[in-house]
Image (tube, helix red, strand yellow):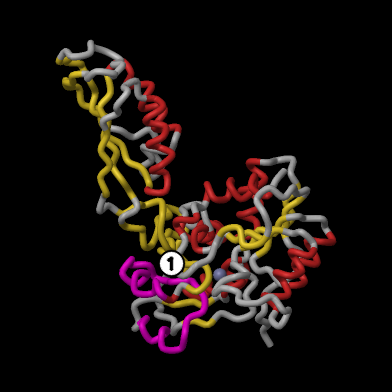
Amino acid sequence: MRVQDITSLLDRLAPPSYQASYDNAGLLVGQPDWSIEKVLVTLDVTEAVVREAKERRAGLIVAHHPIIFGGLKRLTGATYVERVVMAALEAKIAIYAAHTNLDSVRQGVNDAIADKMGLLDRRILAPEKGDLLKLVTFVPTAQADALRLALFEAGAGQIGQYDSCSFNLEGTGTFRAGQGAKPFVGAVGQLHREPETRVETVLPKHLERAIVRALRAAHPYEEVAFDLYPLANENPMVGAGMVGRLPHEMPELEFLALLKREFRVGAIRHTALLGKPIREVALCGGAGSFLRHKAIASGAQAYVSADFKYHEFFDAEGRILLADIGHFESEQFTIGLLCSMISEKFPTFACLPVEKDTNPITYF
Ligand SMILES: [Zn+2]
């Protein structure tokens, strides 16, 4: 196995283009063609984690948090970040991070949190806008089935839990082939009328190149007529946070006890109890206070996240129970998520969940 076998798989499941503008996800240390025996999966990369990777012969560390975040100007060993990068390079260990891109996908960080609460009817709390394109193309009706199949295989036509979505309209195309052309139908210099199908489908922006390549490869015409339109729709499969319904409504204290138990939290910081049962829960792994107003607007009775500041708790204003369960605690199941993503594709390849606890916070 090579580093790129793992990174290209993760890039497909959590496309780097979905990372926030401030983020630095992707391959951070090492070369894509380095050969590896094992991969170590962790939330954070510390010096102890690099030592563990070396001891367990893992040539690649897959992390949630990017160790190089704001840029590195020197490598002198003065900070833990510099020492981690130096130690990794010395041991020829590559480091890859799937961060806010893994937060943003439907089967990502937040889905793993929702699993622990047993939430049903999950949806993205703040779906991404401007991520979808519409593709319209015109193909001889006899070739329409094969063309649609090629587009769907390349990732077009996915709407929520449905795949192979398209709309098709029969019509007539006209063209006249010029000198030097080799028309699929019709003759050079003669106006031709061909029964064609107008195929419409949708795609996420990050697949545009791959899908246009598949379109050109599968379409019989020398010159392929197609249009790409930007859509103002939200993409329900991509965005920040998540909302879902508990299998049974429960009193607030029982819900907080569930969080404490399932997420092994030392202490939960939360707003005053409202005396209302919890049915719908909004959540966001890691620092999710930026979604608190969206969580309130969603109608959920509780918002579970981490890193709330003092003044942000005031914004609840009796409309929602804000619960801060800790950054590490909320994201800890991301390790299992990344391992299962890797093991599902490469069942015989050794993917090791980190043994070292990297949570920098302890509770007294
Ligand atoms: Zn985080």
Q: Residue furthest top?
A: 187
Residue 120 is inside the magenta segment = no
Residue 223 left/right relative to 56: left
Residue 315 is inside the magenta segment = yes
Taking depth in this image into account, of 329 and 11 the one nearest to the observer is: 11
Residue 4 in the image, given as x and y percentages of width and height = 64, 47
Residue 102 left/right relative to 175: right
Q: Residue at x 20, y 26 (%)?
A: 169
Write down the residue under mark 1.
21
Disc 1 residue type (three-letter): Ser
Q: Residue furthest front?
A: 179
Q: Residue at x 69, y 81 (%)?
A: 79
Q: Residue at x 27, y 49 (%)?
A: 230
Query: Badge 1 local density, few (<14 within 10 Å), some, or many (20+)?
Result: few
Residue 195 in the image, given as x and y percentages of width and height = 20, 16
For residue 65, what is the image quadrant? Answer: bottom right
Q: Indicate the secondary structure of the residue bearing disc 1.
A: loop
Query: Which range of residues does the magenta coloring cover?
Result: 290-316
Q: Is residue 39 above or below residue 154?
A: below
